[in-house]
């Protein structure tokens, strides 16, 4: 017989079934069955205790180049560390004896009812992590009832997933002229897209030095890492490089582009990559429906600080006029509580679900969302708050802050 964890567990269960050791776990009287809780380890999908546990599993499955692409940040990766460290400078002030029985994570966002305040960020290159990665994630998002910001293949995604889908645009041709904007808007509206997410922080290609050392060709994110049977890579046609003077064929979009886009569609427009009070205020003036405080997962300009550090100034400048969301380093239910307490309406994540995708495909993405939202609910219960509206600034203190 093949001896693995499953058979070992079955053997143990059978032995315990006839043993008085199991006294405390006997089924109710009258039932012949012995109750055993599902053993951790029986289904590898259930092994990760938190979303960070997916990272080593993903790393073990992925080509090392794909892992570096997924995990890496830009230059010194200082902002990458700051994204996590920022959360550790915030302390939760739990409330005792609040009599919470049910914990409600639901919210209204841009006219949609969401089951919980966790969205899937746009992420390119999913095909080097899992075959047909974008559609796989869309299906997972639909099953998990999460809002998914796709970064391409919208038609396939709306067919694949039934959840609310937003489309992400960057600086490509879409915002270059009134004509290109009009055709973009028409295409998205025709395809049933629920909103537009405009990523503002990717006007130039940053130095992701892990990719530069790996001679990574961005096209491999779309086609997968093209190793031959001997594990050799072809000569990259357009590897990421340093020492190239930054140039663009067309000017980068401006606030006027946002205003014009606003005038062309009724779809909500979310500006992603806002890090300052000035840009938060400007976003409102130009008609944005919301902003995401984001440093692109620390993959663009380095040394911009952790996003949780930037959140308070953006929230203050926006002053409740539009929802403020945040991403970057969110891995825990407590991170989400801290972000909401500092004024975010919802959070977005990328690397956690990408690791889930790489490790297990669609069920991995769904499990990551399940772990995050159940951890959030548990941490809210432990903090004595029963719904999102009850999370306010008084629930946290920044280390060193006087009260
Ligand atoms: C592999 C990868 C690819 C990404 N691609 C995009 C992209 O195409 N467009 C974009 O706006 N952001 C992109 N991002 C940034 C994420 O949308 C998000 O801002 C960030 O990763 C959130 O931080 P987290 O990964 O710590 O959760 C990417 C992030 C990763 C990790």
Image (cartoon, rainbow, N blue to C red):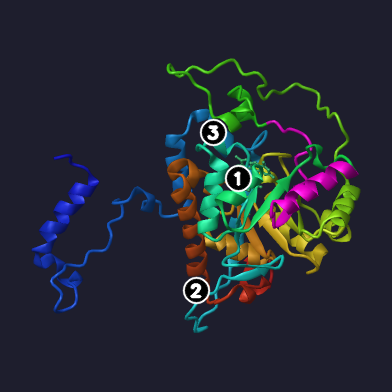
Q: Is residue 146 magenta?
A: no
Within 10 Å of disc 1 (Cα), the crowding (few <14, some 14-19, many 20+) is: few
Measured Cα–Cα span from mark 1 to mark 2:
39 Å
Provide the residue span drawn in magenta.
178-207
Q: Splitting the image into 4 quarters, where does residue 176 fall?
A: top right
Q: Are marks 2 and 3 in contact (CB under 8 Å)?
A: no
Residue 300: horizontal and vertical position, in percent? 71, 39
Residue placed most toward the observer, 365 or 243: 365
Residue 76 visible to an observer of this rendering:
yes
Residue 272: horizontal and vertical position, in percent? 74, 51
Q: Any atom of ligand 1 within 8 Å of the CB at mark 2?
A: no
Quarter of image, ligand 1: top right
Residue 77: horizontal and vertical position, in percent? 64, 38
Residue 51: horizontal and vertical position, in percent? 48, 52
Q: For mark 1, what is the residue? A: 156
Measured Cα–Cα span from mark 2 to mark 3:
39 Å
Residue placed most toward the observer, 79 or 398: 79
Seen as rendered, the residue at the extreme front is 190
> Which residue occupies 84% across, 47% down?
182
Measured Cα–Cα span from mark 3 to mark 1:
18 Å
Q: Are marks 1 and 2 in contact (CB under 8 Å)?
A: no
> Which residue occupies 47% across, 81% down?
101
> Which residue occupies 64% across, 66% down?
340
**In what element is the residue under mark 3?**
helix
Q: For mark 3, what is the residue? A: 128
Residue placed most toward the observer, 124 or 94: 124
Q: For mark 2, what is the residue? A: 381
Tag in front: 2 or 3? 3
Within 10 Å of disc 2 (Cα), the crowding (few <14, some 14-19, many 20+) is: many
**In what element is the residue under mark 1?**
helix
Q: Are marks 3 and 1 in contact (CB under 8 Å)?
A: no
**In what element is the residue under mark 2?**
helix
């Amino acid at each position: 017989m093949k001896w693995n964890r499953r058979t070992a567990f079955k053997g143990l269960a059978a032995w315990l079934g006839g043993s008085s050791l199991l006294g405390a776990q006997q089924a109710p009287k009258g039932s012949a069955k012995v109750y055993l809780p599902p053993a951790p380890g029986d289904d590898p999908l259930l092994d990760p205790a938190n979303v960070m546990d997916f990272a080593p599993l993903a790393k073990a499955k992925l080509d090392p180049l794909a892992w570096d692409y997924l995990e890496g940040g830009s230059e010194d990766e200082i902002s990458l560390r700051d994204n996590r460290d920022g959360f550790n400078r915030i302390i939760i002030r739990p409330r005792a004896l609040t009599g919470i029985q049910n914990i409600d994570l639901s919210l209204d966002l841009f006219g949609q009812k969401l089951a919980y305040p966790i969205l899937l960020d746009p992420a390119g290159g999913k095909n080097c992590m899992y075959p047909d990665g974008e559609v796989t994630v869309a299906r997972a998002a639909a099953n998990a009832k999460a809002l998914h910001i796709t970064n391409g293949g919208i038609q396939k995604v709306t067919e694949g997933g039934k959840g609310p889908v937003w489309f992400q645009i960057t600086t490509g041709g879409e915002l270059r002229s009134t004509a290109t904007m009009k055709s973009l808007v028409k295409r998205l509206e025709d395809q049933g897209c629920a909103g537009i997410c405009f990523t503002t922080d990717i006007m130039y290609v940053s130095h992701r030095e892990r990719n530069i050392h790996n001679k990574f060709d961005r096209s491999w994110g779309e086609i997968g890492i093209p190793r031959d049977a001997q594990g050799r890579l072809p000569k990259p046609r357009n590897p990421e490089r340093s020492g190239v003077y930054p140039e663009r064929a067309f000017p980068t979009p401006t606030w006027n582009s946002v205003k014009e886009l606003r005038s062309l569609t009724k779809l909500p427009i979310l500006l992603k990559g806002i890090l300052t009070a000035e840009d938060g205020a400007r976003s409102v003036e130009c008609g944005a429906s919301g902003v995401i405080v984001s440093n692109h997962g620390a993959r663009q300009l380095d040394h911009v600080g952790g996003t949780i550090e930037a959140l308070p100034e953006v929230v203050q400048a926006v002053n409740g006029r539009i929802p403020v969301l945040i991403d970057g380093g969110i891995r825990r239910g407590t991170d989400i509580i801290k972000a909401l307490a500092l004024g975010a309406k919802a959070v977005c994540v990328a690397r956690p679900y990408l690791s889930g995708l790489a490790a297990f495909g669609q069920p991995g993405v769904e499990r990551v969302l399940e772990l995050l939202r159940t951890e959030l609910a548990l941490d809210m219960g432990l903090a004595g708050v029963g719904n999102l509206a009850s999370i306010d600034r008084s629930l946290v203190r920044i280390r060193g802050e006087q009260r």
